[in-house]
Image (cartoon, rainbow, N blue to C red):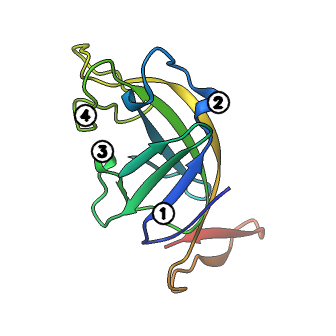
Amino acid sequence: MIQAITETSFIIYVQTEDNRINTSVASTQIRHLVKFTNDLDKSVYYAYGVTETIKDRFTRITINYNITPDIYIGRTKLFPSGYWKYEVYEVSWVGAVTVSSGNAPADEDDVLSPVADTKGVVQGLVTKGKMYLAEKDGTEQVQYTQRQEPSGTNYIYYGQ
């Protein structure tokens, strides 16, 4: 399980090499696209790492917090705190690796065209798991309001 704090940068260590898909290219031709899905509101965010170091058994990926998210340079604004799912997708290049709009897929289903050696191709899912995102300063709260329905049954609603 990955543990991180809201509004801060974090480093994740994930097992990718044992599940590597495209073994015909060197590790330097591989990057990993991370998909974060919130368990509560089902919001989805994507990010490539600011830095990525592939070792024999794991990959170290740094993700930065930023008020303005940008998946290509590893900026994300994960909110709210709580439990998230993460999925890591392998993206490979035949030519020069350029993680930028038009050269790197924006999600796991993105197919770039026209096909070129300088455009990344999503090879598939290499690992997934859970992440707990803790509050940074303790001011974030989930507010619940109990309302009476006409049938007399009580419901709890999630609100902002």
Residue 88 is marked as none
Find residue 22 and report its horizontal and vertical position in percent.
50, 18
The answer to whether the residue labelled 1 contacts the one labelled 4, judged by CB atoms less than 8 Å apart, is no
Please state the horizontal and vertical placement of residue 148, each as a whole percent of the image.
69, 75
**Disc 1 marks which amino acid?**
Phe
- The residues tagged by marks 3 and 2 sit, at their Cα atoms, a distance apart of 25 Å
* Label 1 – label 4 distance at C-alpha: 23 Å
| Quadrant assignment, res 48 | top left
Above or below: residue 98 compared with residue 115: below
- At x 31% / y 56%, what residue is drawn? 69
116, above or below 11, in the image: above
In the rendered structure, which amino acid carries the disc numbered 3? Answer: Tyr
Residue hosting label 2: 18
Q: In the figure, 31 relative to 75: above or below? A: above
* Mark closer to the chain start, 1 or 2: 1
Amino acid type, residue under disc 2 in the picture: Asp
Q: Give the label, 1 or 2, closer to the camera.
A: 2
Drawn side of residue 36 relative to residue 2, left or right? left
Instruction: Tell me residue 141's x, y (percent).
Output: 56, 80
Q: Secondary structure at mark 1?
A: strand
Q: Which label sits on residue 72?
A: 3
Name the residue that disc number 1 marks. 10
Q: Residues within 10 Å of mark 3 (few under 14, many from 20)?
A: many
Mark number displayed over residue 98: 4
Snapshot quadrant of residue 28: top left
Determine the secondary structure under disc 2: helix
Residue found at the far right of this picture: 153
* Callout 1 crowding tier (Cα within 10 Å): few <14, some 14–19, many ≥20: some
Chain-order first, disc 3 or disc 2: 2
How far apart marks 3 and 1 lie (CA) works out to 16 Å
Secondary-structure class at tag 4: loop
